Image (tube, coloured by chain):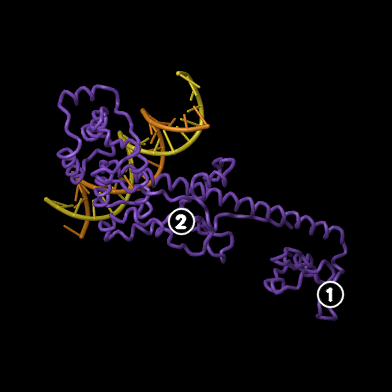
Chain colours: A purple, B orange, C yellow
DNA sequence: CACATGTAGCTGCTTACATCA
DNA sequence: GATGATGTAAGCAGCTACATG
C-alpha cells in the first residue's frame, strides 16, 4: 500500500494571471517584504476594497470635467484577488496603497507660473537650453519617432501646432539642421511638481482619454506624448510592483504548504511505525483514526463488537466542536486490505 | 455581410540618460 | 572624480479594437 501526499498550488491562481506559477522559479529578492515596503506600497489583507482613491482629491479635480464616461477606468484599482489555499476561504485581496501621498504644489501647472523652486524641463525652452528642449520635442515629431510616434494623432498635431504658435518658438532651419546633426537630445527629467501632479492624476485614473491627456499636457506644459509615455511607464511600474507582491504572497503560500507536507509525511511515518509495532492488529478491534482539523492531532478510537461506545485508546483529540465536526475517517488497515482484495 | 485598411491605444521589452551612494 | 546600481523617459515591435470604404 502506498499513500501519496500531493500538494498543489494550482486550484486558485491569481485572477489577473492566466499563466501557471512559472514565475516562482524566478529568484526572489532576499528581503522581499521589506523591499516591498521600501517600494512605497503597503500590502493589506482586506475583505472588501475600500475606496482609497478618495484620498487623492483635489489634485486632479480640475480634470474631472473631462472624464464623464471614464468611470470604467476607475475600476482599475491597484488590487488583486488571490485565490486562497482552501476553496472556501475568502480570496485574499492585496491592496497597493501609496504610503505617502505626494503633496501637490499649488502652482503646478499654472501657465502664468507661480514661483518654481526647480527647473521645469519644458520651461527650459526659455533659457539657454531652449534649443535642446525645443529640439527634443521637434525631434520626436520629425523623426517619425519610431513606434510611439509612428503615426501622429490628429489631436496631437493640433496640440503641437498650438504649442508652436504659443509657447516654444520654432527654430530656424539652420538651427534644426545643426541640432539634428548633433548628438541625440538629452533626456530631461520631469520636475517634481510635474511628476507629483501626474501621480495624483494616476491615482484617479490609470488610463487617459485624449481629452484628459490634452488637459494634463496643457496644465503641465508638456507634450501629450510625454503624458502618454509617463502613464504607460507608470502602469508598467505598478504592474511590476504588483507582480512582486503576488510573488511574495505565493512564496509564503508555498512555504506554508511545504511545511504542511513535511508534517503530514512525518505523521504518515509515525502511523506506519505504529502499524509495524502492532503486527497483530488483525486481532485488535476495529480502529478508527480521526484527526482534528484544528489542532491536527490524531486520535484512535476502537470499537468493540460488543459495544457501540467507542473506547479511546490513544491520545484523545480535544473535544471541541471543531473536533467533532468533519471527522476525516482513516480506514483501519484490515478494512483497507479487504477493500484492496 | 465580409473583408481590407488605417488609426489609436495598449503592453512588453529595451535603450539611454540622470542621479545617487 | 570614477564607477556601478537604480530610476525613468522614451523608442520600438507587436497586438487588439474600432471605424470606414
Residue closest to the eye, A314 or A284? A314
Picture coordinates of residue A211 (x, y %)?
24, 52
Quadrant housing residue A57: bottom left
- The image quadrant where one finds the C terminus of chain A is bottom right
Parent chain of label 1: A
Measured as percent of width and height from the top left, residue C6 is found at 48, 36
Q: Specify the farthest residue to the front.
A: A115
Residue A133 located left or right of residue A278: left
Question: Is C5 situated left or right of A213 in this image?
Answer: right
Which residue appears at 61% of the width and 51% of the height?
A254
In the image, is residue A308 above or below residue A313? Answer: below
| Residue pointed to by mark 2 | A79
Mark 2 residue crowding within 10 angstroms, few (<14) / some (14–19) / many (20+): some
Q: Closer to the camera: disc 2 or disc 1?
A: 2
Residue bearing mark 1: A311
Residue B5: image location, x then y, percent: 18, 44
> As rendered, which of A11 and A1 lies closer to the eye?
A11
Looking at the image, is A284 positioned above or below residue A176? below
Amino acid at each position: 500500500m502506498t499513500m501519496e501526499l500531493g500538494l498543489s498550488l494550482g486550484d486558485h491562481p491569481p485572477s489577473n494571471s492566466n499563466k501557471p506559477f512559472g514565475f516562482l522559479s524566478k529568484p526572489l529578492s532576499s528581503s522581499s517584504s521589506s523591499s516591498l515596503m521600501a517600494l512605497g506600497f503597503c500590502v493589506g489583507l482586506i475583505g472588501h476594497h475600500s475606496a482609497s482613491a478618495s484620498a487623492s482629491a483635489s489634485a486632479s479635480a480640475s480634470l474631472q470635467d473631462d472624464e464623464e464616461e471614464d468611470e470604467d477606468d476607475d475600476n482599475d484599482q491597484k488590487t488583486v484577488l488571490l485565490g486562497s489555499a482552501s476553496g472556501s476561504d475568502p480570496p485574499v485581496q492585496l491592496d497597493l496603497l501609496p504610503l505617502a501621498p505626494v503633496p501637490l504644489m499649488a502652482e503646478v501647472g499654472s501657465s502664468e507660473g507661480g514661483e518654481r523652486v526647480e527647473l521645469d524641463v519644458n520651461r527650459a525652452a526659455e533659457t539657454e537650453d531652449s534649443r535642446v528642449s525645443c529640439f527634443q520635442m521637434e525631434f520626436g515629431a520629425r523623426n517619425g519617432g519610431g513606434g510611439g510616434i509612428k503615426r501622429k494623432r490628429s489631436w496631437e498635431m493640433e496640440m503641437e501646432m498650438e504649442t508652436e504658435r504659443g509657447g516654444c518658438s520654432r527654430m530656424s532651419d539652420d538651427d534644426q539642421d545643426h541640432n539634428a546633426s548633433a548628438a541625440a537630445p538629452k533626456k530631461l527629467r520631469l520636475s517634481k511638481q510635474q511628476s507629483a501632479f501626474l501621480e495624483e492624476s494616476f491615482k484617479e485614473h490609470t488610463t487617459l482619454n485624449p481629452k484628459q491627456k490634452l488637459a494634463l499636457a496643457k496644465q503641465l506644459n508638456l507634450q501629450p506624448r510625454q503624458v502618454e509615455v509617463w502613464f504607460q511607464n507608470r502602469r508598467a511600474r505598478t504592474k511590476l510592483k504588483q507582480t512582486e507582491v503576488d510573488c511574495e504572497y505565493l512564496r509564503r503560500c508555498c512555504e506554508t504548504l511545504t511545511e504542511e507536507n513535511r508534517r503530514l509525511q512525518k505523521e504518515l511515518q509515525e502511523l506506519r511505525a505504529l502499524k509495524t509495532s502492532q503486527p497483530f492488529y488483525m486481532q485488535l478491534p476495529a480502529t478508527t483514526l480521526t484527526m482534528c482539523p484544528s489542532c491536527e492531532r490524531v486520535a484512535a478510537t476502537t470499537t468493540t463488537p460488543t459495544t457501540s461506545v467507542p473506547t479511546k485508546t490513544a491520545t484523545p483529540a480535544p473535544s471541541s466542536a471543531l473536533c467533532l465536526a468533519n471527522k476525516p475517517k482513516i480506514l483501519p488497515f484490515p478494512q483497507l486490505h479487504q477493500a484492496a482484495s
